[in-house]
Image (cartoon, rainbow, N blue to C red):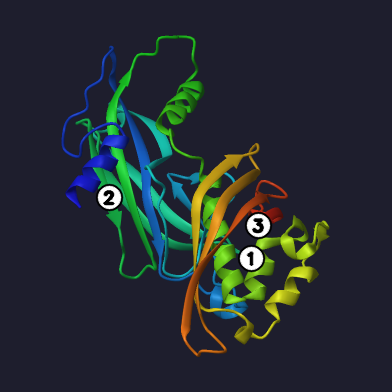
Amino acid sequence: AGEAVASKAAAVGVGVTAPLRRTGKPHRNQMVVSVFLESLYTTTSSDRKWLFGDGIGEFYIKANGARWPSTGEIFLDSNETFAPPQPVAIFTAFHHMKKGKEMALKISVNESDTVYDDKLLRETLTLDMTTPAVTKKLLDDPKSPITLSLFVRIEERLAPTDTTLAPEQMLKRAAQKDAKVVDAAQHEALALTRQLLAHIHARDWSAYERLCEPTLTCFEPEARGHLVEGTDFHKYYFDIDERCFPQNARVTVASPHVRPLGANAVVVSYVRLIQWTKTDAKTAKIVTGTSRAEETRVWRRQHERAPLRCCHFHRSVPS
């Protein structure tokens, strides 16, 4: 566990307890604070599941009023974790020591709702701005369904090489440098792809329909070369007697490749492996096997605040 923490801390620029080392001339009495998301876990999606039968929550984080992600949300079901491969920079700000040796960092985790957003976690951290360092912060209020793991990095602000840069431009550059990870929308699209496949194999039509656009298009073997439009064609397979399907099927998304298409669309390509067991009708013996399919799914938002939904997919099965 210690090695894992040290590795992730190194990804944000320094070991857990070692002081930061930077080249260049620092600004006098000015520091930079950066906040990185390690993981977000929820035990529930607030009251939405009980009122509307919708277990998927739409979450976002605020740090001193700054929203992350800036557009869209993090989609999580109950007892699910969002954990990017490397910590993601969600907040960067300058602090002048004339304002004091400490800085208040207000963190909240919110869930989007149609009427008003639910604030599920709220905590204020007091940061010591006198010493450059990286510290891990675990926010796990027992009264909250949210557990949030963050890294907070404090370092001296270096003098810019281009003295004509405005503070806003410098903040933008700092954020771009810190966020050398896959975009949050790409993580979201891959997580939604796994959720969609789970809903397919659980034959949960309402959950499947929620993640797809009504105008969904596709090419798949069952359509015999025809372009399928809408979701009625797919509903037929959800309504088939469950005894027609293998038991204890396990789905694996293998070799995923995620590619963003601008700010509001993502393409996910992968191999779907299905491990299954069934009872042979003649011998009554248990038979196991693995099938595979190559799939590509296109996810998009209708507008900046809308969730990602699947608008097209292509599935092919090796002959």
* Vertical comparison of 221 with 135: above or below: below
Kind of residue at badge 2: Lys
Query: Which residue shows up at 66% across the image and 74% down it?
Result: 206
Is 293 drawn above or below residue 155 in the view shown? below
Crowding at mark 1 (Cα within 10 Å: few <14, some 14-19, many 20+) = few
SS of the residue at dot 3?
loop
Q: Which mark is residue 319?
A: 3
The nearer-to-camera label among 2 and 3 is 3
Instruction: Give the structural element (helix, strand or loop) at label 2.
Output: strand
Residue at image point 30% right, 41% down: 152
Which residue has dot 1 on it? 115
Give me the C-alpha separation between circle 2 and circle 1: 31 Å
- Residue 120 in view here: yes
Earlier in the chain: of badge 2 and badge 3, it is: 2
Residue type at mark 1: give it. Val
Would residue 71 appear left or right of 131 to someone viewing this image? Answer: right
Q: Specify the label residue 137 is tagged with.
A: 2
* Distance CA(mark 2)–CA(mark 3): 52 Å
Position in image of residue 94 (x %, y %): 37, 29
Position in image of residue 179 (x %, y %)? 44, 34
Between 37 and 94, the one lying in front of the other is 37
Q: Residue furthest front?
A: 283
Residue 183 is situated, as x and y percent measured from the top left of the image, at 51, 40
Residue in the picture at 44% in, 9% down: 163
Q: Nearer the viewer, residue 259 or 27?
A: 259
* Nearer the observer, 198 or 315: 315
Towards the viewer: 203 or 115? 203
Q: Mark 1 and mark 2 in contact (Cβ < 8 Å)? A: no
**Seen in the image, is 190 located left or right of residue 313?**
left
Residue 159 at x, y percent in the picture: 35, 14
The C terminus - image quarter: bottom right
Q: Residue at x 25, y 41 (%)?
A: 7
